[in-house]
Amino acid sequence: MPTPKLFEPISFRSVTARNRVAVAPMCQYCADDGLGDDWHVQHLGARAMGGAGIVMTEATHVSREGRITQGCLGLYDDAHEALMARLAALIASGGAVPAMQIAHAGRKASTRAPYDNGGGPLPADDPRAWQPLGPTATPFGEGYAVPRPLAQSDLAAIAAEFATCAARARRAGIKILEIHAAHGYLIHSFLSPISNTRNDSYGGDLMGRSRLLFEVVEAVRAEWPDELPLWVRLSCVDWMEGGLTLADSVELARRLKATGKVDLIDCSSGGVAASGPKITSLHPGYQVPFADTIRREAGIATGAVGLITSPEHAAEIVANGRSDLVLIARALLADPAWPLRAAKTLGAPLDLMPQYKRATVA
């Protein structure tokens, strides 16, 4: 039987992954001032040894105030860079491509971890709290801190923080970098008309609202080598009246491709405001149509996400050209060897490390 496309190699610029299963970013909320520890080593190492083609870190923040919670991973200090070098080497030793998502939480910053009293914003009088940043002084939702509106000079500094983070990732040995421009975090809060009501050159129409994204892409590429791939994660729709539409995201993807600097759109959705509607049609692959449409209409590679748990479903998505790869989170959180199980189900070969090869015939 021919190898399912899901288990064929895929290349972006100089980087080739052994298959099209990528570990999606999954926040662990257990870093200390941005610095991970042995938890992150075992967590990411297990997914690499389990057979994934690409293993991406959780959202890794470009500054201290850009973290979502006090437990979020960062890459703004030399100690962080040393840990990332260890993680990158470990992932590569397991046969996977080390990847990193870099992020700034924007107006969703200064919150509790989900397992700290259920999450939510830190009260203003909590000594752990800090002021978040945003396009305007409108908070993410009720009970959230009022963000400091960013001046144009602030935005140049934030683009520079992304660039510095990219340089650290490069030195650490990361091979794929993803800019987080989704889920209501800083760049998405500028992209969406729900959260961006500015009347300067960073607001208004889609061109103005996307200015920060393109400046970040430009700044990152100045530090990220041409031979290494750069991805962008978008919230392709806001699921809110008056918010971003799929047509908007197709246009953004076309423009990102035209820069020659971006190689793939990681297609997610939602998260722009705490008051946003609950998505009532949650089902396996509910976001795959976004990846499919952007791939066809913008002519750029896409990654599909969203409750993809079945090997057969993942294989169908890639085989039918609905996306170039799948990014899997919860299924890989439950089973680090999900790629091995999927390969067995689909009758595909999977090259694991010598210590684990017996698992392929068990």
Image: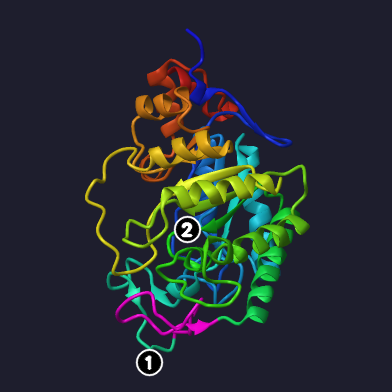
Amino acid at pointer 2: Ala
In the picture, residue 76 is in which quadrant? Answer: bottom right
Quarter holding the C terminus? top left
Residue 68 is a magenta residue: no
Q: Is mark 1 on a helix, strand or loop?
A: loop
Residue 253: horizontal and vertical position, in percent?
Answer: 56, 47
The residue beneath circle 1 is: 125
Q: Is residue 170 above or below residue 187?
A: above
Q: Give the range drawn in magenta.
A: 128-149
Q: Where is mark 2, residue-wise? A: 182
- How many numbered discs sit on the rendered protein? 2
Residue 172, visible in the rendered structure: yes
The residue lying toward the viewer, choosing from 139 and 204, is 204
Furthest residue in direction bottom, as rendered: 125
Determine the residue positioned at 61% across, 65% down: 211
- Name which residue lies at 59% across and 38% down: 300
Residue 138 is a magenta residue = yes
Label number found at residue 265: none
